[in-house]
């Protein structure tokens, strides 16, 4: 490769190696002009461009140039400083995205599980502040029912008997309702309801077992258990509250080029947001 194909920058003592085409994503930026113009801020020393700026923040700028997407750590807080660095380098589309700080910050997500145990039946209601999370969880949960002879609360799943799938009740985009257990029908017949939660393939009838699997599924998905409280002692309703920081999908930049232009003619923002 020629010297122009590979560029080495030392930004605040942090060394970066990249392609010239990466720095030329935005032809009007100082990074693109650096390769051909004499800019006092960019000193060429022993074949490396030295820049007296923040090297840690420049790593995010390099990531943006490579992906055209703003991707920041969950605990990132230097939005104004990074915006100032983007303006210094003449990357105004990036500075514009960073000005929308509220769209880039991780959001606190709350989820509640209400559990009620009544004799041989258990009732569940799951509410979440993010509809996308509730939708994903609903896709993991499957319900089945069937009439069984001599069925009791603790009896295992009778694999030799067919079960009928049941729809999951969704009162709104933010919650779901389901139940499991047995209910007396007639004679020695019982209506049995089973719950399965992917990736676990078991069909569970015992409410306590279903609750344990559901809570374990949420913990593995990054939720943290905040509290457990009794909502109604008479109806034996327990409430489990969870929270997690959910990263937004992020802002991406779509570049469109017009014939005869030297580079990116337009910069359009697009955001894939779900579960507002």
Image (cartoon, helix red, strand yellow):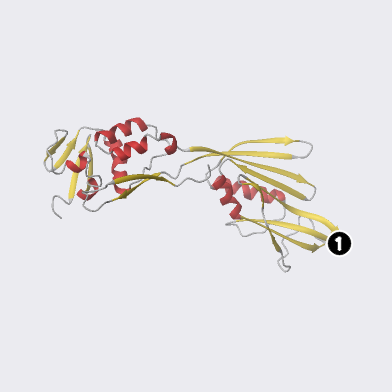
Is residue 239 visible from the viewing direction of this image? yes
In this view, the residue in front, 231 or 22, is: 22
Answer few, some or many: residues within 10 Å of disc 1's Cα (few below 14, many 20 plus, some between 14 and 19). Answer: few
Residue 6: x percent and y percent? 18, 50
Q: Residue at x 37, y 34 (%)?
A: 99
Residue 89: x percent and y percent? 24, 36
Q: Residue at x 75, y 45 (%)?
A: 117
109 with respect to 177 (left or right): left
Q: Residue furthest front?
A: 259
Residue 228: x percent and y percent? 65, 36
In this view, the residue in front, 248 or 160, is: 248
In this view, the residue in front, 201 or 174, is: 174
Query: Which quadrant does the N terminus fall into?
Result: bottom left
Is residue 63 visible from the viewing direction of this image? no
Residue 67: x percent and y percent? 33, 48
Please tell me in which quadrant of the rendered image residue 15 appears. Answer: top left
89 versus 143 height, above or below: above
19 versus 188 height, above or below: above
Secondary structure at badge 1 equals: loop
92 with respect to 117 (left or right): left
177 with respect to 80 (left or right): right
213 with respect to 189 (left or right): left
Give the residue number, with chain letter if any, for mark 1: 188
Please tell me in which quadrant of the rendered image residue 87 appears. Answer: top left
Q: Residue at x 66, y 54 (%)?
A: 168
Q: Residue at x 67, y 57 (%)?
A: 167
């Amino acid at each position: 490769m020629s010297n122009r194909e590979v560029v080495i920058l030392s930004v605040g003592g942090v060394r970066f190696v990249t392609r010239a085409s990466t720095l030329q994503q935005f032809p009007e930026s100082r990074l693109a002009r650096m390769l051909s113009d004499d800019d006092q801020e960019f000193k060429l020393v022993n074949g490396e461009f030295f820049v007296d700026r923040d090297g840690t923040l420049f790593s995010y700028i390099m990531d943006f140039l490579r992906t055209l997407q703003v991707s920041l750590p969950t605990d990132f807080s230097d939005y104004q400083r990074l915006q100032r660095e983007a303006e210094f380098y003449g990357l105004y589309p990036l500075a514009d995205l960073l000005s929308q700080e509220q769209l880039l910050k991780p959001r606190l997500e709350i989820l509640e599980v209400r559990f009620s145990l009544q004799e041989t039946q258990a009732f569940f209601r799951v509410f979440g502040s993010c509809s996308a999370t509730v939708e994903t969880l609903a896709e993991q949960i499957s319900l089945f029912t069937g009439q069984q002879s001599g069925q009791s609360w603790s009896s295992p799943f009778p694999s030799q008997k067919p079960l009928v799938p049941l729809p999951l009740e969704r009162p709104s985009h933010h919650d779901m309702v389901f139940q499991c257990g047995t209910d007396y029908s007639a004679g020695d017949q019982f209506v049995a309801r089973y719950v399965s939660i992917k990736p676990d393939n078991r069909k569970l009838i015992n409410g306590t077992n279903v609750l344990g699997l559901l809570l374990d599924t949420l913990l593995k998905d990054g939720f943290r258990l905040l509290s457990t409280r009794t909502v109604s002692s008479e109806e034996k309703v327990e409430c489990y509250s969870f929270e997690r920081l959910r990263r937004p999908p992020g802002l991406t930049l779509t570049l469109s080029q017009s014939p005869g232009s030297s580079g990116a003619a337009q910069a359009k923002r697009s955001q894939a947001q779900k579960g507002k």
